[in-house]
Amino acid sequence: MFKIYQIRSFSDIPQRQTFDFTKETKENGEIIRSIIKYNLIEYYRHEKNIELQYPKLFCLECYFLHDRRDPKHLPMEICKILQWQECEREVKINFFKI
């Protein structure tokens, strides 16, 4: 299963992309929610069972089509760019020390 996103720009490396993840577990018929602070490397390792091979590559800042309220930061190595996609404008990258 894949999702289609629109790429907006580049963002920071996965190690510096942190967020709060709400994990739900069932115990004795009750749903227990716990909040875990992850960076993208930890998230993909623990929640998706994916070990990122290139953790120092920039992420892509992406949106669902026509919905720019909630950007997603995706490691480049998990994305598949289709051949018909094109850049609508020049992408300016501010490189910084990794």
Image (spheres, rainbow, N blue to C red):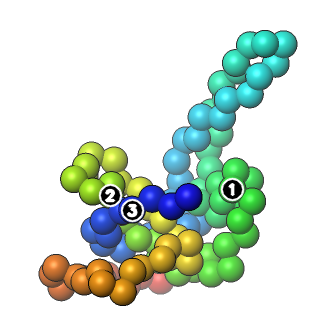
Callout in the foreground (1, 3): 3
The amino acid beneath tag 1 is Lys
Question: Residue at point 30% right, 84% down?
Answer: 84
Quadrant of the rendering where the N terminus is positioned: bottom right
Q: Secondary structure at mark 3?
A: loop
Q: Position of residue 34 (x, y in %)?
A: 67, 29
Report which residue position mark 3 lands on.
Answer: 4
Other residues around mark 3 within 10 Å, as few (<14) / some (14–19) / many (≥20): few
Q: Position of residue 46 (x, y in %)?
A: 74, 53
In the displayed structure, does residue 81 sit left or right of residue 56? left
In the displayed structure, does residue 66 sit left or right of residue 60? left
Total numbered labels placed on residues in the image: 3
Quarter of the view holding residue 52:
bottom right
Eyeballing the image, is 43 above or below 22? below
Q: Earlier in the sequence, mark 3 or mark 2?
A: 3
Q: Cα distance, mark 3 to mark 2?
A: 9 Å
Residue furthest right in the image: 28
The amino acid beneath tag 3 is Ile
Q: Position of residue 3 (x, y in %)?
A: 45, 59
The amino acid beneath tag 2 is Tyr
Report which residue position mark 1 lands on.
Answer: 48
Mark 1–mark 3 contact, CB under 8 Å?
no
Residue furthest left in the image: 89
Report which residue position mark 2 lands on.
Answer: 63
Question: Residue at point 33% right, 55% down?
Answer: 64
Q: Earlier in the sequence, mark 1 or mark 2?
A: 1
Q: Position of residue 74 (x, y in %)?
A: 48, 65
Q: Is residue 77 visible?
A: yes
Q: Earlier in the sequence, mark 1 or mark 3?
A: 3
